[in-house]
Image (tube, helix red, strand yellow):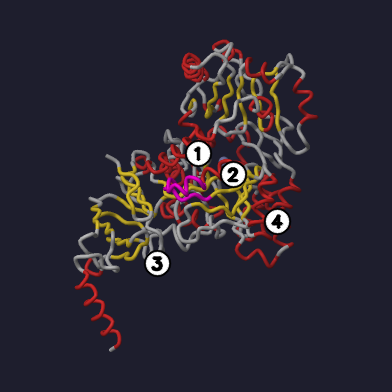
């Protein structure tokens, strides 16, 4: 009886408000497409309704949705809608600067790199630094004639720019390439390599690669890059802010509604807060504090996490630690030597004691730790340190959400430990597509097959994988990474059946790895990541059905629309 009374009241309320703004009426209805919710209890729907920024209806019956004259309707015209895609590991400022600096991601060989640099030199002021990022010598064809430890040498680069200093970052960010002018400014000479081992503190890897005569070749790995990079004039605030805005625009165009930033410093955090206050932060940002600045960490331990629990516009409750190098530059830290460099194991890039102490402090103060680990040794060491911290504070571990970023190469004995310890692997599937063809040279067949990018082995233990691109290490577009997740092929489509095909993700798993699992990896699974009543209305609309089309067609798919908080933030023409 009471129920009918309420219904009657609701009808009365509706009818008297029907031409104004009924508080119950949907502000947005979306229909006529394929809707995938990533919610197992209701995987598909025909219609979604949104009130302001919250989903109020998911189902098949439009008559159940209260409307008024202001209700906007989006007709999908057969397109496909998913929960808003979340980039689970990227570098927002780097993405912005990639748009501002020389982008070397697509150069196919040394000559193409030289062409782009020559063009920049011709436009530069005398003596101005020229910076760029994205080269990757292992992917070049043809390979340069002269290689030292697998890298090109600076002579050709120096010849085209005798007066402008140049520093070009490797795509992985773990090595740099300088010309003679830059090395002259930095005071790097034949004797610097000998001095370097004394300059860098223990556990801080880095190398100046030298030729057989002992002369530097222009390649600096890991922290040795700093010897040159410190002479590049600092970017000013306005430039940084411009880069951040450009990166946000880039996200919206690619359907990205949330972004996990893998390590930020004080200045950028200030700028992000400024942008939030100015309402210029459309993509929901999840920021990891850089572990390179201990005073920054201490400051945040004091004040505690910053969580915007309703909107998650800008959350800070995470710490990024960089624990080893990359595989390309042979910096990834391995249990057994590299297959293509005798006696070389790679190295840690910070002391493991720091990982342990940071993990303990993070647990005590409510922070998550996200540690970068690529090699199997680095992964094992991090799991060990996490475990020590968890055992030290058992009362704090029920919701720690500690992550390992990349988790690329695992020893068989460590795969099950992720689930046992509740550690989340954040793995960028696109790295497999890019690296797998040459990673086998570094690791050999057995290690590749047993433990490289073993998504299915990990998923079967019950963990959730956070996907992403590591942009600007790889292009930010999530679709190539989605494609790599389900095909385990390179972007050129090889090999036909995929590398280690039993490790492919299903479409459903790949969708979750870009939606609900990264939401979980950022403590946001109750507000984001699936299409469910009560959650934030973040959606990505694709022009093809990525859940059913052929693998090749995934790479031809375009984002049609990006909706964040019930508002259209990007629409393709
Ligand atoms: Zn990264």
Span shown in magenta: 273-286
* Callout 1 crowding tier (Cα within 10 Å): few <14, some 14–19, many ≥20: many
- C-alpha span from label 2 to label 4: 17 Å
* In the rendered image, the vertical position of residue 139 relative to residue 36, given as above or below: above
Circle 4 is placed at which residue position? Answer: 361
Q: Secondary structure at mark 4?
A: helix
* Callout 3 crowding tier (Cα within 10 Å): few <14, some 14–19, many ≥20: few
**Nearer-N-terminus badge (1/2):** 2
- Mark 2 vs mark 3: give the one in front: 2
The residue at the point 75 percent across, 21 percent down is: 192
Image quarter hosting the C terminus: top left
**Nearer-N-terminus badge (4/3):** 3
Q: Any magenta on residue 275?
A: yes
Q: Are marks 4 and 3 in contact (CB under 8 Å)?
A: no
- C-alpha span from label 2 to label 3: 35 Å
Q: Secondary structure at mark 1?
A: loop
Circle 3 is placed at which residue position? Answer: 41
């Amino acid at each position: 009886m009471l129920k009918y009374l309420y219904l009657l009241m609701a009808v009365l309320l509706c009818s008297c408000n029907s031409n104004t703004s009924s508080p119950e009426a949907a502000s947005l209805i979306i229909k006529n497409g394929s809707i995938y919710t990533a919610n197992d209890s209701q995987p598909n729907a025909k219609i979604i309704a949104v009130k302001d920024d919250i989903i109020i209806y998911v189902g098949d019956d439009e008559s159940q949705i209260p409307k008024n004259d202001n209700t906007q309707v989006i007709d999908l015209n057969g397109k496909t809608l998913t929960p808003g895609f979340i980039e689970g590991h990227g570098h927002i400022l780097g993405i912005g600067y990639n748009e501002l600096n020389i982008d070397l991601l697509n150069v196919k060989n040394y000559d193409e790199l030289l062409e782009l640099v020559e063009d920049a030199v011709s436009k530069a002021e005398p003596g101005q630094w020229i910076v760029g990022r994205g080269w990757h010598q292992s992917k070049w064809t043809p390979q340069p004639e002269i290689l030292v430890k697998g890298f090109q040498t600076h002579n050709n680069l120096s010849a085209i720019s005798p007066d402008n200093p140049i520093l070009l970052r490797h795509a992985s960010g773990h090595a740099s390439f300088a010309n003679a002018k830059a090395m002259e400014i930095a005071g790097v000479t034949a004797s610097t390599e000998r001095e370097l081992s004394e300059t860098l503190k223990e556990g801080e890897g880095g190398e100046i690669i030298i030729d057989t005569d002992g002369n530097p070749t222009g390649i600096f790995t890991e922290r040795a890059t700093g010897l040159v990079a410190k002479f590049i004039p600092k970017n000013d605030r306005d430039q940084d802010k411009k880069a951040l805005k450009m990166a946000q625009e880039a996200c919206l165009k690619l359907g990205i509604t949330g972004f996990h930033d893998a390590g930020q410093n004080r200045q950028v955090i200030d700028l992000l807060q400024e942008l939030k206050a100015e309402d210029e932060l459309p993509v929901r940002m999840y920021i990891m504090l850089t572990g390179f600045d201990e005073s920054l960490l201490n400051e945040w331990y004091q004040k505690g996490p910053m969580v915007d629990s309703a909107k998650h516009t800008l959350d800070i409750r995470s710490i990024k630690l960089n624990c080893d190098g990359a595989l390309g530059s042979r910096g990834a830290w391995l249990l057994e030597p590299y297959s293509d460099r005798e006696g070389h194991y790679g190295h840690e890039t910070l002391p493991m004691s720091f990982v342990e102490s940071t993990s303990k402090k993070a647990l005590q103060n409510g922070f998550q730790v996200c540690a970068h680990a690529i090699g199997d040794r680095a992964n094992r060491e991090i799991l060990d340190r996490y475990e020590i911290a968890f055992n030290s504070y058992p009362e704090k571990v029920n919701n720690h959400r500690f992550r390992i970023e990349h988790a690329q190469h695992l020893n068989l004995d460590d795969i099950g430990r992720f689930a046992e310890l509740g550690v989340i692997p954040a793995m960028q599937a696109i790295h497999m597509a890019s690296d797998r063809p040459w990673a086998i040279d570094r690791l050999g067949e057995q290690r590749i097959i047993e433990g490289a990018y073993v998504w299915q082995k990990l998923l079967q233990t019950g963990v959730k994988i956070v996907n992403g691109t590591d942009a600007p290490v790889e292009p930010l577009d999530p679709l190539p990474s989605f494609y790599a997740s389900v095909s385990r092929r390179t972007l050129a489509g090889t090999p036909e059946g995929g590398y280690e095909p039993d490790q492919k993700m299903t479409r459903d798993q790949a969708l979750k790895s870009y939606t609900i699992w990264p939401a979980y990896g950022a403590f946001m699974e109750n507000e984001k990541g699936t299409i469910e009543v009560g959650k934030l209305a973040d959606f990505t609309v694709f022009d093809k059905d990525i859940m059913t089309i052929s693998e090749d067609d995934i790479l031809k798919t375009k984002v049609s629309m990006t909706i964040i908080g019930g508002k259209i933030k990007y629409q393709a023409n």
